[in-house]
Image (cartoon, coloured by chain):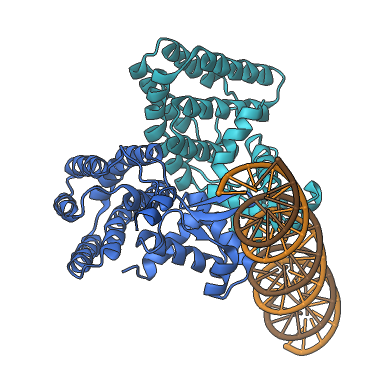
Chain colours: A cyan, B blue, C orange, D brown
Amino acid sequence: MPDRKDAHRLHDLFQLPQGRTLDICLKIHGAILEHRLAPGTKLSEDEVGEIYGASRTVVRAALQALAHTGLVAIEKNRGAFVAKPSIREAHEIFEARALIEPRVARMAAKAVTGKDLARLQAHIDAEHQALHAGDMGKALFLSGAFHTTIADIADQQVLARMVRSLISRSSLIIAMYWKRPDTACESHSHHALMKAFAEHDSDAAEEIQKSHLIDLHSGLNLVEVRQQNDSLKDILRAG
Amino acid sequence: MPDRKDAHRLHDLFQLPQGRTLDICLKIHGAILEHRLAPGTKLSEDEVGEIYGASRTVVRAALQALAHTGLVAIEKNRGAFVAKPSIREAHEIFEARALIEPRVARMAAKAVTGKDLARLQAHIDAEHQALHAGDMGKALFLSGAFHTTIADIADQQVLARMVRSLISRSSLIIAMYWKRPDTACESHSHHALMKAFAEHDSDAAEEIQKSHLIDLHSGLNLVEVRQQNDSLKDILRAG
DNA sequence: TGCACAATAATTGTATACAATTTTGATTGT
DNA sequence: ACAATCAAAATTGTATACAATTATTGTGCA
């Protein structure tokens, strides 16, 4: 569950001082992370504005902020759509994560406190619970939150912001290219990380995070493309 | 000189489809990178709009985009100001660069072509020329362009975008905290990089870039802060 | 003189109206 | 039946007007 503190940290991702605009950003962001909004979905300004009771002005600002983080793609005179990361982009994003996050994990292992450990454990528990309840979207959301929390613990705002953006985009990638229906494989790495953090073992934390991300990357089916839009014709003809 | 291609690449940094908004973004961005706009300068919407002949709507969008990259700070109900990176932020940014750019240089060394080498050389020459003409701002701008060009050569859009943002912010940091009045120290590293690229020596490229960034970092005076705004009183009293 | 308070001016936040562009659907001709 | 062309509708791009907030200035009082 995204508590007040998480929301405050997210503020940094969008750099928006306006409360109304930020609210809409966070809501759409959350919907994308929980896979309630599918990649490619059109986000009409009027429609979004009506839903949240806001004028197009603030909706536009929110969509542009989301576009800047890569979660939304704006096409000239066509509007905003939930981004559909290409295979190439997916590779790049997970390579970037594999570069940055191990370093962040190392820093976090040094700075971590007992309170932080409790926070991380809460994320793991909540994820486990969501998984048990069959709420895949929420479980995925919390899995990402685990990673962003690590970045917060490391207390490196510049890197934390990058990590947050990469993880959000990863959520889109997983929505499009995830191979296995089970996400249980992750929990092992997260537990191992917890252990390393508890022992302030920065070498281990870095190494575990590195292989964890390689695992995630390899868990994606990035060979074949499902051009859902382009193959629509074939799909309907087959029926 | 920022040619058409550079401008096109910059488009990626802001993710703005609207031409008018993007234009203003690029102009302010350029002014900041060339140190024509000092950190802390207020960017009034009306004022900027009048200068570029645009309405507040597009100016606002441009300022928000710049805020998202960290070049501008927007304060609620107070307006937009050219960002003033803190010492801590400066450390974080150069640490992030030291993490990311060596990897990018490694990739670039593998992918570099003869045409790319010529492009890099052109940057070096132009920088040398600007330096000779005493145009410090332009020289600094081109020095940054050298780094972003490397990221483009590596052909990793995700990392390239991060690098671009970090370099732009570095320009602000240099404006605030640069110690030495001579920038000649840099050209040595850039030449060494050129050599590594020409030989496709990725190990060397990575290592050179790493130490180059450490050099830059240590060239900053990040101990004392010059609170230029707060010392206004002292300045006027001294006269 | 110094401080507190109030009125004014200036600036940002938001909504709405109009212009430009794209998409959709219909009509016509082959 | 199919393609092309054109008109209508819907959507985004931009400008402007109004509301809310902040900064500044002026005034009165201790």
Q: Residue at x 48, y 50 (%)?
A: B69
Q: Is residue B183 visible from the viewing direction of this image?
A: yes
Is B236 or B23 nearer to us in this picture? B236
Is D7 positioned to the left or the right of B237 in the image?
right
Vertical comparison of C18 with A156: above or below = below
Q: How many marks?
A: 0
Q: Position of residue A206 (x, y in %)?
A: 37, 23
Q: Position of residue A150 (x, y in %)?
A: 49, 25
Is A35 or A5 nearer to us in this picture? A5
Q: Residue at x 44, y 26 (%)?
A: A154
Q: Quadrant of residue B181?
A: bottom left
Is B109 or A183 nearer to us in this picture? B109
Q: Position of residue D13 (x, y in %)?
A: 63, 68
Of the 4 image quadrants, the one containing the N terminus of chain A is top right
Q: Is residue B157 visible from the viewing direction of this image?
A: no
Is A86 positioned to the left or the right of A7 in the image?
left
Vertical comparison of A1 with A89: above or below = above
Is B86 positioned to the left or the right of A229 in the image?
left
Q: Position of residue C9 (x, y in %)?
A: 67, 66
Is A100 positioned to the left or the right of B179 in the image?
right
Q: Quadrant of residue B221?
A: top left
Q: Residue at x 71, y 47 (%)?
A: A20
Q: Residue at x 40, y 10 (%)?
A: A199
Is A187 or B23 nearer to us in this picture? B23
